[in-house]
């Protein structure tokens, strides 16, 4: 299962998404480098903001459906109550037809927001993998890790990676595996792992000092090592621990506020009658707690992304709420109806064109068939006529020959 989700440059289902996102992150890194700033933390924050803004149109569409759904929900609930104790097939079909009529009335469908979620899911998963494996997508960072590898002698390669050869004798795939191991990306059945007790810090201690300082600089974010998890910094000192705790706490807080802002978009009265309301309330509290836990156990780089993403989502939700207050739900319904009508017209037009082409083709085939049939009949009549004439001529010739034979016989025997 893990191999299907890998988003490295070498492939995977999420590969195309990860490559595009990786190019965006590399462009941001180069932009900071132009001003002499080499820091992955700042790059992740800007990167998260850019990606979330690119996904903003889909978020707005999803919020429009949420607002529309708040209006539809009471009507759907009334239909469900109407058929609550009716389990026969006819009643179930009638219920489905009435619910479908409600969706048609508002110009939408039960899967109205699914498309946005389906599009966002691979982007978010690829985004997570890019941040987990930054050296695979940001070439200046990868070059630093390559310099570290090429600076190790055979004894250190054996000590850190369990490999007997020098880096310059390894294949590009092996080098990439070693970089994955150093960046903390390698796991499970990885081709190359760091030997027990080895850390990136230990490797940098025996490498070139200038390269080691650069890697320290790009991974340092206000005293935090972005390659380590906040949980692993528990014994790093009180100040470092407090700074490390800020990431998961803020991530959970921002997500909680974002959820609360989203709930204001819904009709509270209708949500109280919704049988899923209890489960939704539990999820609204569980998701922020899950964010806190994930940001605690994962690398600080992922925590920065999660925190920045939650903050951007919260700010987006504030502006979306302000915008949606100005939008009349009737305007959304009318726009949906117009889109549905336009799609229906296009569908009818396509069906009409297809039907006309089929009819024209059938007429052409009929004319061709009729023409071929008449030609065959004429040829057949002509052949019959010619056959009759040939038979008549043959019979006439046959009779004349017999008469001539008799006359010749009489002449020969007349003198005898």
Image (tube, rainbow, N blue to C red):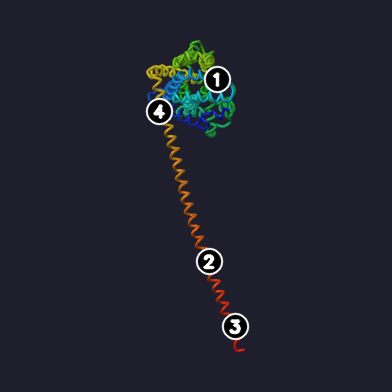
Q: Which residue is mark 2?
A: 388
Q: Secondary structure at mark 1?
A: loop
Q: Are marks 2 and 3 in contact (CB under 8 Å)?
A: no
Q: Of marks 3 and 1, which one's residue comes earlier in the chain? A: 1
Q: Of marks 4 and 3, which one's residue comes earlier in the chain? A: 4
Q: Secondary structure at mark 4?
A: helix
Most foreground residue, 190 or 203: 190
Most foreground residue, 226 or 197: 226
Gap between marks 2 and 1, in whole Å? 83 Å
Residue 2: which numbered mark, if any? none
Q: Secondary structure at mark 3?
A: helix
Q: Residue furthest top?
A: 238
Q: Which residue is mark 1?
A: 83
Mark closer to the observer (4, 1): 1
Q: Are marks 4 and 3 in contact (CB under 8 Å)?
A: no
Residue 409: which numbered mark, if any? 3
Q: Of marks 2 and 4, which one's residue comes earlier in the chain? A: 4
């Amino acid at each position: 299962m893990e191999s299907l989700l890998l988003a490295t440059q070498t492939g995977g289902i999420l590969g195309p998404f990860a490559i595009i996102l990786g190019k965006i992150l590399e462009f941001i890194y180069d932009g900071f480098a132009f001003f002499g700033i080499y820091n992955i933390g700042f790059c992740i924050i800007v990167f998260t903001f850019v990606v979330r803004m690119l996904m903003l149109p889909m978020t707005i569409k999803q919020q429009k459906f949420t607002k529309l759904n708040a209006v539809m929900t009471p009507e759907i609930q009334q239909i469900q109550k109407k058929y609550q104790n009716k389990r026969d097939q006819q009643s179930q079909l009638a219920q489905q037809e009435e619910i479908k009529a409600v969706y048609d009335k508002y110009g939408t469908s039960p899967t109205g927001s699914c498309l946005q979620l389906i599009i966002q899911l691979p982007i978010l998963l690829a985004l997570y993998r890019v941040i987990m494996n930054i050296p695979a997508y940001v070439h200046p960072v990868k070059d630093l890790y390559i310099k570290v590898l090429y600076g190790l002698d055979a004894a250190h390669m054996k000590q850190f990676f369990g490999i007997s050869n020098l880096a310059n004798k390894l294949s590009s795939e092996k080098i990439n595996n070693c970089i994955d191991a150093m960046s903390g990306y390698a796991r499970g059945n990885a081709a190359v792992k760091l030997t027990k007790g080895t850390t990136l810090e230990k490797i940098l201690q025996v490498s070139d000092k200038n390269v080691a300082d650069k890697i320290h600089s790009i991974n340092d974010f206000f005293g935090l090592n972005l390659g380590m998890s906040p949980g692993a910094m528990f014994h790093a000192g009180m100040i470092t621990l407090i700074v490390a705790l800020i990431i998961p706490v803020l991530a959970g807080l921002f997500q909680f506020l974002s959820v609360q802002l989203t709930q204001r978009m819904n009709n509270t009265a209708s949500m109280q009658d919704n049988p899923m309301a209890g489960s939704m309330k539990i999820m609204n509290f569980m998701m922020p707690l899950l964010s806190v836990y994930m940001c605690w156990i994962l690398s600080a780089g992922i925590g920065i992304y999660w925190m920045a993403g939650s903050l951007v989502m919260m700010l987006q939700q504030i502006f979306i709420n302000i915008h949606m207050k100005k939008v009349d739900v009737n305007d959304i319904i009318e726009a949906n109806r117009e889109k549905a009508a336009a799609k229906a017209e296009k569908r009818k037009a396509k069906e009409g064109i297809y039907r006309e082409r089929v009819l024209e083709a059938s007429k052409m085939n009929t004319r061709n068939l009729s023409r071929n049939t008449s030609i065959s009949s004429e040829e057949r009549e002509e052949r019959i006529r010619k056959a009759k004439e040939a038979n008549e001529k043959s019979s006439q010739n046959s009779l004349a020959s017999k008469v001539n034979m008799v006359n010749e016989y009489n002449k020969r025997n007349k003198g005898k």
